[in-house]
Amino acid sequence: MSDQASGPGLPHRSEWWRTRRVAFAAGLGLVGIAVLATLARTRPIDVTAIPVRRGSIARTLVLTGRVRAPARTRVGASVTGTVREVRARAGDHVARGALLVALDDAPARAALDQARASLATADARARSTADQAALTVRQAARDLERARALFAQGAISARDVEVAERAAAVARSELDAAQARAPAEGSPAPALAEIARARAAVAVAQAQLALARIVAPAGATVLARDVEPGDLVVPGRVLLDLALDGATELVAEPREENLAELRPGARAVASADAFPMRTFAACITRIAPVIDPAQGTVEIRLAVPEPPSYLRAEMTVSINVEVARHDAALVVPLDRVGGAGGAAPWVVLERAGRAERRAIRPGLQGEGGVEILAGLREGERVLPASVAPGARVRVRVDADREAR
C-alpha cells in the first residue's frame, strides 16, 4: 500500500500519526499535573498548636508623660546690689539655709556699725544720768543726817529738817527714774526713747545686711542659674530656679474617653525615654476634677515609690497604666485569633486531621493575648489563624507553651 494520500489536499499519513502522538502525550502531561496538584492540596500541612492555658491577663493604657518637680521656686534679690559670689550651679543640690548668692555688703556693714555706735552713745548717756542721780541721792542723804544732828543739838529748826527730808526724797525719785531709763545688767531693752530708736536702727541695719545673702529656702536642686559675679541685680529679677525636695511624681494627660478606665491606686510601669530599657513602678494618686476643653485631656499624677537616680525634672517618660486585670483567665495569643476586633472573631482547631474554625467570645485584650470567655476549653490546642478551614493538618505541639 502506498503512504501517499488517496485524494488531493489531504496530509501525508505519517504526519497524521505524529500529530496524534503529540496530542496524546500532551494530554497525559495535563492529567499528571492535575493529579500532582490534587495530591499537593490533600497533603497534610505541618502546623504548631498552642494549648489553651489559664493565667493572668492585663490591659494597659500607654501614655506619654513627664517627671514633675514637687515644687519649684524662683529665687531673686530683695535689694539692689552687685553680686560678689555665686555658690550654686545648675544641677547642684543645696540644703536649707545654704548660701546661694552673696551681694556686696560693704554699705550694709557700714550702716550697721554706725547704728551700733549710736546705740552705745545712747547707753553711755543714760548710764551717766543715772550715775549723777545716784551721787545726788548720796549727798542728799548726808545732808539729811547732818540736819537731824544739828536739830538735836538745837542749832537748827524743825523746818530746816523738813527741807532736807524733801530734798532727799526728790533725789531718790530722780534716781529711780534714771535707773528705769538706763540699761541694767542682764535686763531687756530700756524704755528710753533715745535708746529705743538706737536699738531699732541696729535691727534695721542687721536686716539690710542679711538681705545681701541669698540663701536656699529649703532643700532643693538648682535647675537654672541666671547670675554671675559682678552682675548688678535689682529686686524682682530671678537669679536661680530651684526644684524643692519632695516625693517624685509623674504627670500624664490621657484622652478623656479613657477616663472611665482610670482610678486612683492603679499600678503602672514607666521608663524614661533616655533609658528605655530600665523600668520603675508607679501608681496613680490623683485624677484632675476637670477636663482640658482645648485638648480634650485629663491630667493624672502618679507617685514613684522608689525613683531611680537618673530621673530629672521635666524628663519625658513612657507610662503603661494597668487599667484592668483578670487572673485565672483562659488566654490565647493574639496572633492565633482571627477577626480580632470584629463582630465575629474565631480560632482554628484540629478535628479529625483537618482545620476547623470555631467562633469565640473574647474578653479582656492585653499585650499579646486575648481572654476567651466562651468557645474554648482549657487544654484545647489552637492552630495558626492563617490555616484555611478544611485543610489537612499534621499538628505539632509547642513544647514551650505546653510546659507553661
Image (spheres, rainbow, N blue to C red):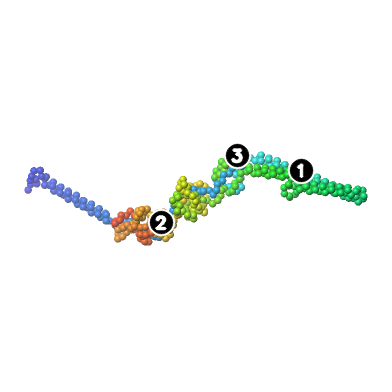
Location of mark 3 (residue): 234
Mark 2 crowd level (few <14, some 14–19, many ≥20, 10 Å Cα): some
Amino acid type indicated by mark 2 = Leu
Q: Nearer the viewer, residue 62 or 307?
A: 62
In 3D space, how far apart are the residues under numbered discs 2 and 1 (Cα atoms)?
91 Å
The answer to whether one can see residue 329 in this image is: yes
> Is tag 2's residue or tag 1's residue first in the polypeptide sequence?
1
Mark 3 crowd level (few <14, some 14–19, many ≥20, 10 Å Cα): some
Amino acid type indicated by mark 3 = Val
In 3D space, how far apart are the residues under numbered discs 3 and 1 (Cα atoms)?
40 Å
Mark 2: which secondary structure? strand
Q: Position of residue 219 (x, y in %)?
A: 58, 49
Location of mark 2 (residue): 364
Q: Would residue 150 appear left or right of 355 to someone viewing this image?
A: right
Q: Position of residue 161 (x, y in %)?
A: 88, 49
Q: Would residue 152 appear left or right of 34 to someone viewing this image?
A: right
Residue occupying the far right of the picture = 154
> Is tag 3's residue or tag 1's residue first in the polypeptide sequence?
1
**Residue drawn where x is 41% and y is 55% of the image:** 366
Amino acid type indicated by mark 1 = Arg
Mark 1 crowd level (few <14, some 14–19, many ≥20, 10 Å Cα): some
Q: Would residue 153 appear left or right of 79 to someone viewing this image?
A: right
In 3D space, how far apart are the residues under numbered discs 3 and 2 (Cα atoms)?
61 Å
Residue 131, placed above or below residue 354: above
Residue occupying the far front of the picture = 159
Location of mark 1 (residue): 125
Quarter that holds the C terminus: bottom left
Determine contact: label 3, label 2, CB under 8 Å.
no
